Amino acid sequence: MAQKLLSLPVGVDVLVVDGNSSDGTGKLRTNSPRNTRKFMSCTSRKKRAGPRLHPRIKWALERGYEFIFEMDCDFSHNPDDIPMFLEAAKNQDADLVLGSRYSGGVRVVNWPLKRLMLSRSAGIYVRIVTGMLFTDPTGGYKCFRRRALQAINLDEVQSNGYSFQIELTHKLWRQGYKIVEVPIIFTDRAEGHSKMSGHIFWEALWMVWKLWFQNGLRRWPRKR
């Protein structure tokens, strides 16, 4: 994945965030590819997305990056889609670009029906409770614009897993920042296993109600 990202024509820097996994990711610190563009790796003892990514987002902001991506490293998110994200952000002046598995139809490969139904139901549930009209609010393939992340107090973001994805999007949406979706094809990982658990499921279930209350019981964003 690192080699693929560093070879993209748009030119990216790579920060690998390893959640203390057992797949050898941590070894990238010593075996990083030689390239003129930056490649960095870091290891966190935190296994969940939220606490693991907060300091990494701050790291990117401190270094002046204009566009900051979040994506999985198991090729379920296709790195070739990155130019499409950037084009959407620039042409539509978007503050957040969401990669959607369900925009204009279902674009999921090799997922069991049970997992697909859970994902689709979660998106509908988020839409009903919060009023966000996005087709894939739980997805983890995103492109943030710098000004959007600067508008979020990351120290106040406490959620993990899918609710972390929902919370970041909702905080920007309710402030009136522009969010657009681009269609992606999601392919289930060839190796490893999902971190989905009962705790993550229940956290996401109640988190959307918390976000609704934070928005003053409104199901629409504020005008900017």
Image (tube, grey):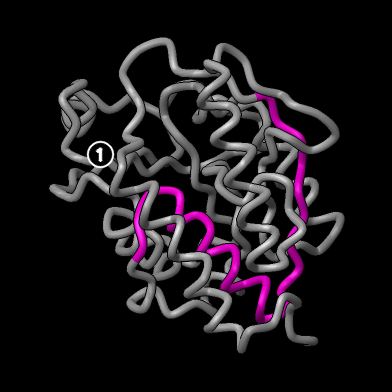
SS label for mark 1: strand
Q: Identify the image quadrant of the N terminus.
A: top left
Q: Nearer the viewer, residue 173 or 199?
A: 199
Crowd around label 1: few <14 · some 14–19 · many ≥20 (10 Å): many
Quadrant housing residue 77: top right
Q: Percent position (x, y) of residue 149? A: 53, 70
Residue on which the image places disc 1: 18
Judge from the rendering whether residue 129 lies leftward or rightward of residue 207; answer left or right: right
Q: Is residue 66 left or right of residue 193?
A: right
Residue 118 location (% of width, % of height): 54, 35
Which quadrant of the view contains residue 174? bottom right
Is 194 on the left-hand or right-hand side of 124? left
In this orientation, which residue lies closer to the viewer: 38 or 205? Answer: 205
Residue at 57% of width from left, 18% of height from top? 113
In the image, residue 192 above or below residue 223: above
Q: Which quadrant does the C terminus fall into?
A: bottom right
The answer to whether residue 176 is magenta is yes
Where is 37 relative to 113, above or below?
below
Residue at screen point 67% across, 59% down: 96
Q: Is residue 133 rendered magenta in the image?
A: no
Q: Residue at x 58, y 68 (%)?
A: 146
| Residue 92 location (% of width, % of height) | 85, 58
Q: Nearer the viewer, residue 57 or 35?
A: 57
- The boundaries of the magenta stretch are 159-185
- Relative depth, front residue between 75 and 7: 75
Residue flagged by tag 1: what amino acid is it?
A: Asp
Q: Which residue is rendered at x = 65% and y = 68% of the image?
A: 130
Residue 58 x %, y %: 37, 67
The picture quadrant where one finds residue 27 is top left
Q: How many marks?
A: 1
